[in-house]
Amino acid sequence: MTAAIEFQGVEKRYGTTLALENITLEVPKGELVVLIGPSGCGKSTLLRLVNRMIEPSGGKLLVEGQNVLEADAVRLRRSIGYVIQSIGLFPHMTIFENVEVVPSLLNWDKLKKRSRAAELLNMVGLEPEKFGSRYPKQLSGGQQQRVGIARALAADPQILLMDEPFGAVDPITRERLQEEFLRIQREIQKTILFVTHDIDEAVKLADRICLMRDGKVEQYATPENLLAYPSSDFVRDFVGADRELKRLGRVSVASLMRPVAKVDIRFQTSETASVLGTLSARDALSRLLEAGGELLVLDAQGGIIGTISLNDLTVANMDYRQRKP
Ligand SMILES: Nc1ncnc2c1ncn2[C@@H]1O[C@H](COP(=O)(O)OP(=O)(O)OP(=O)(O)O)[C@@H](O)[C@H]1O
Ligand SMILES: [Mg+2]
């Protein structure tokens, strides 16, 4: 894998506090890596090293192959998108102007800036005609958060740093922002370092999760593997007692179903409930708890591709289907 960001034995001291200790970590290009762990474990510190808001006290940090200490700090910062919980929109600037902050610093011409801002506002679900000329305080918290994301993407950075970007919004808005954000990321495929406190958010969004503890990496793994093979009691406790349910949230019905080669005559006459193969196994479980028995699994064209029952949703079946320690 090509690493967009590479920590090699990185250390960060604040006076006598060792905030980060011997961090070795590779963030692959185009992946979304979530940093998670108890308060004070060093998540924000790790993030802020990447665009050189702070500098390492030891070890080496490479961004796109270049040692950050040898990069031009201003140029580096402008080339990396940054989103924080408090959003940090400029209150005296319109939404358009907020999104255009970095392009303005880069001297883009007016027309190019505005069309880019409009494109991004559309992408995050805010109509530019309606919202572009408003001021931040005339938007809800969730809408401001979207503007924050649009602003971070304005100059088309290859890397995005996001520090609890959805931390300040209500649970429903948060879920909607997560869905939209995932949809956008599938399109733009940026390298993203994303900090959260919320293990469900981590499991939902991450390609990989880096679980930290006291300035060190406790486990770095895909969500599937973190849930299936916690490396210590600390990880096990952190992911929670319902880790099997969380695992179901990461796999599709199609990956656990019993495929059917051709449609069984039984199903043409019965009124068996059905689910799409792309649905998460966790959602299928909810449906099974309602419907009982088994469900037909359909492809996008409505063709029957398999069946799924409670027996297919067991840990043993998940382990069997996705054996990759
Ligand atoms: N500027 C600073 N000066 C001194 N100590 C600091 C400074 N910034 C952070 N620290 C310390 O470094 C450690 C890691 O802080 P950091 O902000 O990275 O934690 P975090 O994991 O982001 O926590 P949270 O989840 O609460 O945001 C903490 O012990 C913190 O007190
Ligand atoms: Mg923090």
Image (cartoon, helix red, strand yellow):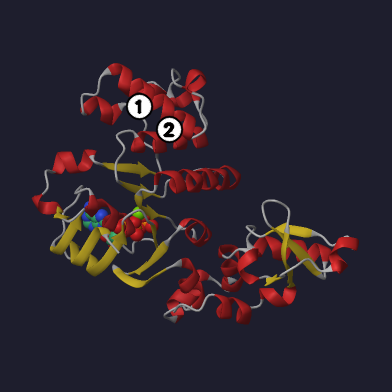
Q: Determine the quadrant in which ligand 2 lies.
A: bottom left
Q: Is residue 218 left or right of residue 138?
A: left
Q: Which residue is mark 2?
A: 147
Q: Which mark is residue 98?
A: 1
Q: Nearer the viewer, residue 41 or 145?
A: 145
Point out the image quarter for the C terminus: bottom left
Residue 158 versus residue 321 in the image, above or below: above
Residue type at mark 1? Asn
Give percent across and percent down for residue 311: 72, 77
Q: Is mark 1 within 8 Å of ligand 2?
A: no
- For this orientation, the residue located farthest to the left is 70
For the residue carrying disc 2, how many other residues have a C-alpha within 10 Å: few (<14), some (14-19), or many (20+)?
many
Q: Residue at x 31, y 22 (%)?
A: 112
Q: Is residue 285 left or right of residue 14?
A: right
Point out the image quarter for the N terminus: bottom left
Q: In the rendered image, is residue 257 in sight?
A: yes
Element assignment for label 1: helix
Q: Residue at x 40, y 44 (%)?
A: 188
Residue 250: image quadrant is bottom right
Q: CA distance from mark 1 to mark 2?
A: 8 Å
Q: In the rendered image, is residue 167 in sight?
A: no
Give percent across and percent down for residue 9: 19, 69
Give percent across and percent down for residue 287: 76, 61
Q: Nearer the viewer, residue 65 or 85?
A: 65
Element assignment for label 2: helix
Give percent across and percent down for residue 291: 83, 63
Q: Residue at x 16, y 39 (%)?
A: 75
For the residue carrying disc 1, how many other residues have a C-alpha within 10 Å: few (<14), some (14-19), or many (20+)?
many
Q: Are marks 1 and 2 in contact (CB under 8 Å)?
A: yes
- For this orientation, the residue located farthest to the right is 269
